[in-house]
Amino acid sequence: MHREFICIVCPNSCHISVEYEGTNIKDIKGDQCPKGRDYVKNEITNPLRVFTGSVLVENGDFPLVSVKTSSPIPKQYLKKVGEITRQMKVEAPVELGQIVARNLLNKKIDLIATRKIKKINKKNSLLS
Ligand code: SF4
């Protein structure tokens, strides 16, 4: 089988051309360093991505908090994690790096906040 990849490991974005059978790479061209071959191997066997999204916040100074998975997850779970985050709400305050959800899909997938959200009271004054 033949496939073309663009390596996303570094800004060089090498165009890599691969011939493979199953998980066995028979020929590879365009990889400018060993990380490119590792990237292609992972893409063929178990592609991983960091999920990024946002979650609704209640009583915060901003209505959404941006989140990401604490580590790359199998690509096949990205859509389901996105569906879950669209139904979630968290209560302010939210700290940068705070875990806002744990063990999603029972796959040890945690979501962490990538920004801080302050709590507001009903008179719209900031509390923290
Ligand atoms: S193959 Fe190496 S140099 Fe090319 S984009 Fe991937 S990591 Fe960067």
Image (tube, rainbow, N blue to C red):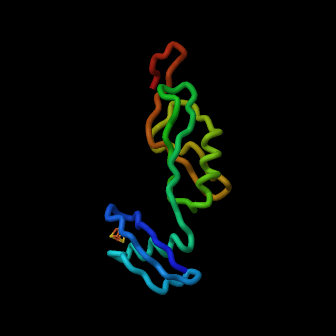
- Is 124 located above or below residue 116 in the figure? above
- Identify the residue at horizontal 47%, vertical 37% (top origin): 95
Which x, y percent locates residue 56? 57, 34
Camera-side residue: 123 or 39?
A: 39
Residue at image location 64% in from the left, 46% down from the top = 83
Ligand 1 occupies quarter: bottom left
- Residue 114 in the image: state x and y as whole percent: 45, 43
- Residue farthest to the top, as pictured: 123
The total number of labels drawn is: 0
Q: Which quadrant would the C terminus be assigned to in this image?
A: top left
Q: Residue furthest bottom?
A: 26
On screen, residue 49 above or below 91: below
Where the N terminus falls, by quadrant? bottom right
107, above or below 52, in the image: below
| Nearer the observer, 62 or 127 | 62
**Residue under the point 48% across and 28% down:** 62
- Residue 90: x percent and y percent? 58, 35
Indicate whether 5 appears above or below 124.
Answer: below
Percent x, y of residue 123: 51, 13
Of all residues, the one furthest to the right in this rendering is 106
- Residue at 61% from the left image edge and 60% from the top image edge: 76
